[in-house]
């Protein structure tokens, strides 16, 4: 084999992000159990970290907060039929508060820095209900992260389910359920995306990676009892609670979820939370 031929057989590494919460476990099950080829490098982190790595060209393909796609839709393409969504309550995206939402004007709400989507959703809900709180954003994963003077806190992911937030706040508001009750639609919390330049220069690699995601997700749901047991063990939660959690989560992106995503982005634009309308463009 000539040197030129040998170079052609070596596939450049495709950099792929992975959420380090259990909510994406079904999608990554197969990849975590032998499906990752040598030409893919997996990089794990919370949503905000992965968002930043995509923005800084350090990942080719990754799950990102839906709102992050809205902010950077001209540089990204959505991978079809992949999301983290809920049709009703979601359990892991919550607003803890000392007051009902309608009484939060002038109050301090802490937003976790780990999710652009959940932060945007809280701001949208407040705007639509003509509530004007004071927002601050910071790391928020334990009770110790809370400032002394705070009236509500938006927390997500594993921390939302494992920390005793009720010890500090009176109300627990599930944002997935609130959105459903308000709009009648599911909510799409995260999408899988590819950078447009990567899609252009490495189209076949991205297509192969997408096929791997589909295979990996199928294996995840084929082994959902194992996924549930693993999640319960990682978080120290009852298996029945984690089973309910995965029953509420959906990892597809069907037409109804796409409609909900369109509505969310339009609402953010109409309420001046996003500066421009968002086009949903798929790989």
Image: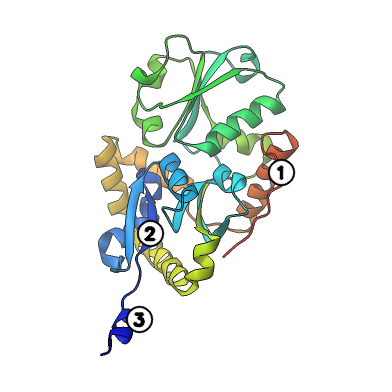
Query: To which residue does mark 2 refer?
Result: 15
Residue 182 horizontal/vertical position (percent): 67, 34
Q: Is residue 203 above or below residue 276?
A: below
Crowding at label 1, few (<14), some or many (≥20) Cα neighbours within 10 Å? some
Mark closer to the observer (2, 3): 3
Callout 3: SS: helix
Residue in view at x 55 percent, y 32 percent: 119
Q: Depth check: 52 or 184 in front?
A: 52
Q: Which mark is residue 8?
A: 3
How far apart are labels 1 and 3 at the CA level?
A: 42 Å
In the picture of the structure, the residue carrying the numbered disc 1 is 276
Expressed as whole percent of the image width and height from the top left, the position of residue 165 reads 40, 21
Residue at image location 50% in from the left, 70% down from the top: 201
In the image, farthest residue toward the top: 149
Name the quadrant containing residue 144: top left
Q: Quadrant of residue 276?
A: top right
Instruction: Tell whether 217 sits left or right of 130.
Output: left
**Mark 2–mark 3 distance (CA, rounded to whole Å):** 19 Å
What is the residue that sits farthest to the bottom in this orientation? 1
Question: Which x, y percent locates residue 23?
Answer: 40, 45
């Amino acid at each position: 084999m000539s040197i030129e031929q040998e170079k052609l057989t070596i596939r450049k590494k495709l950099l792929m992000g992975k959420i380090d919460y259990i909510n994406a476990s079904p999608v990554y099950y197969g990849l975590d159990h032998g499906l990752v080829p040598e030409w893919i490098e997996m990089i794990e982190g919370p949503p905000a970290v992965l968002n930043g790595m995509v923005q800084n060209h350090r990942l080719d393909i990754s799950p990102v907060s839906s709102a992050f796609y809205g902010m950077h839709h001209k540089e990204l393409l959505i991978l079809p039929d992949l999301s983290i969504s809920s049709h009703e309550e979601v359990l892991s995206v919550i607003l803890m508060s000392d007051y009902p939402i309608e009484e939060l004007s002038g109050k301090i709400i802490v937003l976790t820095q780990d999710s652009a989507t959940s932060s945007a959703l809280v701001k949208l809900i407040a705007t639509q209900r003509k509530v004007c709180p004071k927002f601050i954003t910071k790391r928020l994963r334990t009770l110790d992260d809370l400032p002394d003077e705070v009236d509500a806190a938006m927390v997500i992911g594993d921390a939302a389910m494992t920390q005793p937030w009720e010890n500090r706040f009176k109300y627990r508001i599930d944002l997935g359920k609130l959105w459903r009750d308000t709009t009648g639609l599911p909510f799409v919390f995260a999408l899988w995306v590819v950078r447009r330049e990567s899609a252009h220069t490495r189209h076949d690699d991205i297509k192969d990676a997408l096929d791997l995601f589909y295979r990996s997700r199928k294996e995840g749901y084929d082994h959902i009892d194992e996924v549930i047991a693993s999640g319960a063990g990682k978080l120290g939660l009852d298996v029945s609670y984690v089973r309910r959690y995965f029953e509420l989560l959906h990892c597809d992106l069907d037409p109804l979820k796409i409609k909900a995503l369109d509505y969310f982005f339009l609402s953010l634009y109409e309420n001046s939370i996003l500066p421009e309308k968002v086009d949903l463009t798929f790989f």
